[in-house]
Image (spheres, helix red, strand yellow):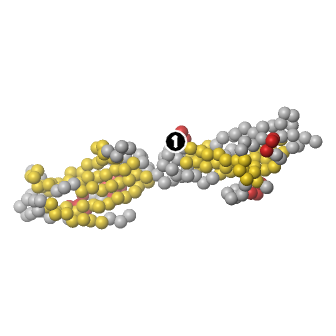
């Protein structure tokens, strides 16, 4: 991340270093103090030129976050566990002189989630004997999906079926003929079921595959 400083001259003869910054932080990976230290008030005071008779100065710091309707709401601090846009506003002033104040400088802090969910299958291989009377049928065994941010109810899993020539084709994404529901009518052979999860921040998982083999073991 790069940081650039803009020197802004604002009446009455106050100069403040404006943090023209947007940084991205992964949810739950940094604490609030680390954000504060990354661009603290000392960095701003260094660029603030006060007249010698002006007295000591202070910087007021406030925080806001953006709602879905793009309006901004005040908050006590940046919540590092919520994916959303935040900004820190700095207002420099000379103590006891309300008219000697700069315009606010802002730093954007975007809490992001770029980690894809993970799908686990148990079992990963299923064999169905369609030669029995009545024939065995396949029942979806389900999956376990985990994510660093999204709850399971906010993760979408898509499932697609393919016929393959041999079990070794299972993890070859480009191999396989799409089919609908797998049943005895689909024919004896090997099939792969592909699972892909997408979380609420549109991170897509690595596909996982279940091997389904339709067999006729009745003599």
In the picture, which quadrant includes the C terminus? top right
Q: Residue at x 48, y 49 (%)?
A: 201
Residue 31 lies, in percent from the top left, at 38, 51
Mark 1 element type: helix
Q: Nearer the viewer, residue 31 or 110?
A: 110
Q: For residue 50, what is the image quadrant? A: bottom left
Residue at 11%, 55% (x, y): give it.
Answer: 100
Badge 1 density bin: few <14, some 14–19, many ≥20, Cα 10 Å? few
* Residue under the image location 66 percent in, 40 percent down: 142
Please name the residue that numbered disc 1 is placed on.
154
Observer able to see residue 173: yes
Measured as percent of width and height from the top left, residue 48 is found at: 17, 63
Give how far across and how far down residue 29 sits, in percent: 44, 53
Q: Is residue 213 left or right of residue 115?
A: right
205 or 180, which is in the foreground? 180
Q: Quadrant of the N terminus?
A: bottom left
Q: Residue placed farthest to the right in the image?
A: 219
The residue lying furthest to the left in this view is: 53
Say if residue 75 shows up in the picture.
Answer: no
């Amino acid at each position: 991340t790069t940081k650039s400083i803009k020197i802004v001259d604002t009446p009455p003869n106050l100069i403040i270093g404006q943090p023209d910054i947007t940084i991205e932080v992964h949810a739950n990976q940094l604490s609030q103090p680390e954000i504060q230290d990354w661009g603290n008030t000392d960095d701003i005071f260094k660029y603030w030129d006060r007249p010698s008779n002006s007295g000591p100065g202070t910087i007021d710091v406030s925080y806001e976050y953006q709602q879905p309707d793009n309006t901004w709401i005040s908050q006590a601090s940046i919540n590092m566990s919520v994916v959303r846009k935040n900004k820190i506003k700095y207002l420099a002033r000379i103590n006891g002189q309300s008219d000697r104040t700069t315009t606010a400088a802002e730093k954007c802090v975007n809490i992001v989630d770029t980690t894809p969910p993970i799908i686990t299958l148990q079992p990963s291989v299923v064999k169905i004997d369609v030669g029995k009377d009545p024939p065995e049928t396949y029942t979806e065994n389900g999956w376990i999906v985990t994510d660093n941010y999204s709850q399971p109810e906010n993760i979408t899993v898509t499932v697609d079926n393919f016929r393959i020539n041999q079990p070794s084709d299972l993890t070859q994404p480009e191999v396989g003929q799409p089919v609908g529901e797998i049943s005895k009518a689909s024919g004896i052979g090997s099939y792969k079921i592909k699972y892909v999860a997408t979380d609420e921040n549109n991170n897509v998982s690595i596909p996982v595959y279940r091997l389904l083999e339709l067999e006729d073991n009745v003599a």
